[in-house]
Image: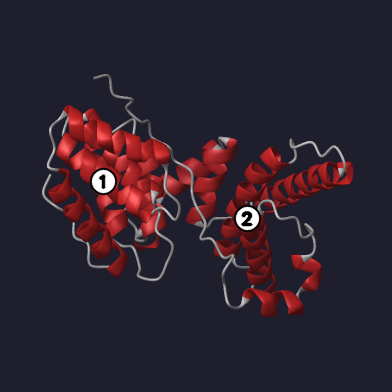
Amino acid sequence: MKLRFFIIFLPLTIAGCDNSPNLAQLCQENTEICNDFGKDNWCKVERNNVSLSRIALKNKPSADIEKFTLLLAYESYIKCMALASQIQHIKLKEKTTMRKNHLLKAKAHLVALTDETASSEHPHLLYYHWSRTANRTALEKFLALEGSPILENAIDQYHLATYYVKREPKKTLRLLYRSLELHQPQTELEVETLQTLATIFTNKKEYKQAYIWLKAYELAQETPDKWVVETLQQYQQAYQLDHEFLDEVAMNTLDNILAGSFTTPRY
């Protein structure tokens, strides 16, 4: 059986806020922000993430973390709206035009905020400017912080791992585990950490570990991923894995991560 091994994807994610109990109230108090991109049914979650991030930044105008979060929110909205704007409405052509206008507006906001944060010294933004604009100075400043307390958080440990992933595999593994150790309960999990671990163990031909981390990645998703489900089935069949046992290990591992009680295993 020929397996379709997955590659490493390193995007960053932002929590979906569509069901936030505070959204309606916040939008009543910030109508100019929440109405900026209309009320289209497409990309609703992404649009609400942008609104909530902009409101958070409005309340903390000099907060770099809020700016970083908003940059990611804009990116997600743009990615979604780029697809939605390609849908042609025969009877409602104004909807197509509206979506294209919103896409252009979001891109302009993203460029403006990217320029505004270009000189920031915050590690999240240093990484952002290296990964998005190939800013070598930002990368050098970010790497110079390695080993310091300021990078002792789940996001920056994951960011470090993305830099070392093609350079030092063993160090990458340690950084990914450290990122999971530092995950705080009730905060958004960097699910790509789980997928990257699955990729590393696939490359090492340690298929039980690869299955466990890919299963944990699947369980962490809000919506099922057909491709991930198929890959898990292929692993199970090709390597005669005890999937029921490994599924339980994956579930317990994810529970520990979300509870903030994960510890790095021996490797």
Disc assigned to residue 71: none
Which residue is the site of mark 1?
A: 213
Residue sitting nearer the eye, 129 or 177: 177
Where does the image place residue 126, in percent across and percent down from the top left?
A: 52, 49
Q: Tell me which amino acid carries mark 2.
A: Glu
From the viewer's perspective, is residue 66 above or below residue 23? Answer: above
On the picture, is 154 further left or further right than 28? left
Where does the image place residue 136, in percent across and percent down from the top left?
A: 52, 36
Image quarter for residue 253? bottom left
Q: CA distance from mark 2 to mark 1?
A: 27 Å
Residue sitting nearer the eye, 121 or 255: 255
> Could you say whether the residue bearing mark 2 is in a helix, strand or loop?
helix
Regarding residue 90, the answer to whether it shows in the image is yes
Image quarter for residue 82? top right
How crowded pointer 1 is (Cα within 10 Å; few <14, some 14-19, many 20+) is rated as many
On the picture, is 102 further left or further right than 56? right
Q: Which image quadrant: the N terminus?
A: top left
How crowded pointer 2 is (Cα within 10 Å; few <14, some 14-19, many 20+) is rated as many
Where does the image place residue 62, in percent across and percent down from the top left?
A: 64, 68
On the picture, is 182 further left or further right than 28? left
Which residue is the site of mark 2?
A: 46
Q: Tell me which amino acid carries mark 1.
A: Trp
- Check contact, mark 2 vs mark 1: CB within 8 A: no
Q: Residue lying furthest front in this view?
A: 91
Identified at 12% across, 44% down, the residue is: 267
Colouring style: secondary structure
On the picture, is 198 further left or further right than 46? left
